[in-house]
Amino acid sequence: MARAATTSDVFNAVAEPRRREILIFLLGRERPVTDVVEQLRIEQPAVSKHLRVLRDVGLVRVRRNGRHKLYQTRAEGMKPLHEWSAIFERYWSHQLMRVKERAENMAGAGEKETAKP
Amino acid sequence: MARAATTSDVFNAVAEPRRREILIFLLGRERPVTDVVEQLRIEQPAVSKHLRVLRDVGLVRVRRNGRHKLYQTRAEGMKPLHEWSAIFERYWSHQLMRVKERAENMAGAGEKETAKP
DNA sequence: TATATACATGCCCATATGGGAATATGTCAA
DNA sequence: TTGACATATTCCCATATGGGCATGTATATA
């Protein structure tokens, strides 16, 4: 084995800077591939490949219009990412964090935990 | 060139399923490396490497305590990810999306846009 | 000091994958 | 049907990197 099975999911898709650019670019408006190529200065094959990944994980939708294919970001596809990162939200305040820390230290006093000095 | 310069950032760090597990495990409570190894069933060297990545991008903090090193998730480090995904929030409603779409189609009627049928 | 414990790092391999070039596929227009 | 345009796919290469194994480093204890 090597390099964890790529589990091409939303987290992976969004890890690519280029794909993040594309997602923002396609947000709220349909655009043909050519627009992405021209505006973001990415080679056409590269754009097609990125769009393919984004489509596979449900982050963009496509619709054919004549010779063009119109892509648009599927914002709902971002929900898993948003919800996961939201788990950390309640710990953003150092105050809250310390409180929880103390509470858990007291609660876990009898466990096999490594005690703090 | 190949495989975009790894720009080891939060997005990349979180793309790894194992690292996501570790982040949740270390949330709100300090833990020695051994705990991660035992609870998540990951080999110790692997854990150390993941923790290294997470530390480099500011997603965990460390503190030495005797022979142990106590790791804990730095929730604030998740902010960039959370804020970025929040950009898509206002497009989650299909209703809203359609409205915006129509508005922009009207506004952009004279541009070089690929017109819709 | 010697030994055990806890963690980090180096090395190697296998694989995933972004980009470039060329080519294939699909659609419209003449 | 032929040609031009739009997009997708294939092939290849270079590199990044996760995991396993062995080893290095740091700290506490005997």
Image (spheres, coloured by chain):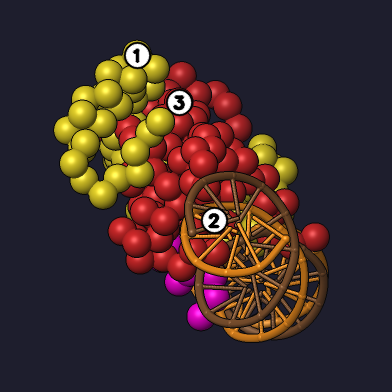
Chain colours: A yellow, B red, C orange, D brown
In whole angstroms, how far apart are the C-alphas of marks 1 and 3? 12 Å
Mark 2: secondary structure:
helix
**Which residue in the structure is indicated by mark 1?**
A95
Q: Position of residue D6 (x, y in %)?
A: 59, 55
Between residues B66 and A4, which one lies in front from this camera angle? B66
Quadrant of the rendered image containing residue B64: top right
**Which residue in the structure is indicated by mark 3?**
B76
Between residues A19 and D28, which one lies in front from this camera angle? D28
Magenta stretch bounds: A1-8
Kind of residue sitting beneath label 3: Glu
Between residues B18 and D10, which one lies in front from this camera angle? B18
In the image, residue A30 sits, relative to residue B76, either above or below, namely below
Both labels 3 and 2 in a single chain: yes
Quadrant of the rendered image containing residue A98: top left
In whole angstroms, how far apart are the C-alphas of marks 2 and 1? 28 Å
Mark 3: secondary structure:
helix
Disc 3 to disc 2: CB gap under 8 Å: no
Residue beneath the point at 39% across and 50% down: B22
Disc 1 to disc 3: CB gap under 8 Å: no
Q: Position of residue A111 (x, y in %)?
A: 21, 45
Kind of residue sitting beneath label 1: Gln
**Which residue in the structure is indicated by mark 2?**
B48
Q: Position of residue B33 (x, y in %)?
A: 45, 52
Question: Which mark is nearer the camera, 3 or 2?
Answer: 2
